[in-house]
């Protein structure tokens, strides 16, 4: 059986934080006598002196300082347990799994998640970064609650979020830029293209923009950006992901004679919005606000 209670430790922390029994009593809306009694019971139960009186202030003893560190953790955990219980009683889920295509502007996801976390601070979030058919596949297999993909699913709820513009780019010193003219499809075929592998395990797709017979295939967009920045090839990349590199002169748009920009529609995919948990619904609403 425990010798102490959470309420006693709450009063102990209040005295330590406010420097006196009267101040603590006022701060946590208790009577000074109840604060005195709680501290006395703690010290008796633990056979430990927690405070010493210096003038009109209650100061922690060395033992009291050590105990305070653990007390704060204990009380913080108690608050979390109560918050979690409240979430569960209200029907909120404890975990949210989201799959997001790597070409989707990540800041939109981060901003929405931050807002959701303020309302559901104990919500555990799992964010899977996918490519091409990857997001559509994992929502189809019920591995995630929500997915953001460039490929809609006919048997799921699909909502248009935003369009992502892509452009063909290479390092300014790349041989394609040295031609100093508009480039044809045949020009691209003679140079190495960096492409991103589909993260799906079945029904893999290509992006339809593979215009070169020379290809290096990588797992993520960031690697592709690093490689072409170093001059190892050219690639079609989302404008938002390379804005900084273009501004700093590390990448330059290829002067294509055909379709120098291409656009992908991004979709929010889910099974049934009415069956989503409270946190998932909050995320969807926040995402809509940031995308529209």
Image: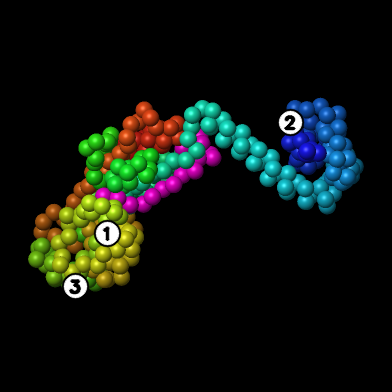
Q: Residues within 10 Å of mark 2 (few under 14, many from 20)?
A: few
Residue 132 within the segment the image draws in magenta: yes
Q: Residues within 10 Å of mark 1 (few under 14, many from 20)?
A: many
Residue at image x 66%, y 38%? 78
Q: Nearer the viewer, residue 257 or 14?
A: 14
Mark 2 vs mark 1: in front: 1
Q: Does 105 sit above or below residue 155? A: below
Chain-order first, disc 2 or disc 1 = 2
Mark 2 vs mark 3: in front: 2
Residue at image x 50%, y 38%? 94
Element class at badge 1: loop
Q: Does 129 sit above or below residue 190? A: above
Please name the residue that numbered disc 2 is placed on.
Answer: 28
Please name the residue that numbered disc 1 is placed on.
Answer: 197
Q: Is residue 243 visible?
A: no
Residue 92 at x, y = what percent? 48, 32
Disc number for residue 175:
3
Q: Nearer the viewer, residue 237 or 130?
A: 130
- Tag 2–tag 1 contact (CB < 8 Å): no
Q: Is residue 44 visible?
A: yes
Residue 118 within the segment the image draws in magenta: yes
Residue at image x 27%, y 59%? 197
- Give the residues drawn in magenta, as a range: 116-134
Chain-order first, disc 2 or disc 3 = 2
């Amino acid at each position: 059986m425990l010798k102490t209670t959470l309420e006693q430790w709450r009063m102990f922390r209040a005295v330590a934080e406010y420097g006196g029994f009267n101040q603590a009593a006022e701060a946590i809306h208790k009577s000074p006598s109840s604060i005195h009694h709680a501290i006395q019971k703690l010290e008796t139960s633990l056979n430990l002196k927690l405070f010493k009186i210096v003038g009109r202030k209650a100061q922690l003893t060395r033992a009291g300082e050590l105990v305070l560190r653990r007390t704060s953790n204990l009380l913080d955990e108690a608050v979390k347990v109560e918050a979690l219980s409240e979430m569960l009683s209200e029907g909120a889920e404890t975990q949210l799994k989201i799959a997001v295509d790597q070409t989707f502007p990540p800041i939109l996801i981060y901003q929405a998640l931050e807002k959701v976390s303020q309302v559901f601070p104990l919500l555990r979030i799992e964010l899977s970064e996918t490519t091409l058919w990857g997001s559509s596949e994992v929502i189809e297999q019920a591995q995630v609650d929500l997915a953001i993909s460039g490929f809609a699913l006919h048997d799921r709820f699909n909502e248009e979020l935003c369009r992502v513009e892509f452009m063909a780019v290479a390092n300014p010193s790349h041989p394609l830029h040295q031609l100093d003219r508009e480039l044809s499809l045949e020009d691209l075929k003679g140079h190495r293209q960096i492409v991103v592998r589909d993260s799906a395990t079945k029904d893999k797709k290509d992006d339809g923009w593979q215009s070169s017979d020379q290809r290096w295939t990588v797992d993520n967009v960031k690697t592709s950006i690093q490689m072409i920045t170093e001059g190892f090839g050219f690639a079609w990349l989302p404008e938002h992901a390379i804005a900084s590199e273009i501004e700093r002169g590390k990448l330059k748009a290829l002067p294509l004679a055909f379709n120098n920009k291409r656009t992908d529609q991004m979709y929010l995919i889910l099974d049934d919005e009415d069956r989503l948990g409270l946190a998932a619904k909050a995320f969807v609403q926040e995402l809509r606000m940031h995308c529209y």
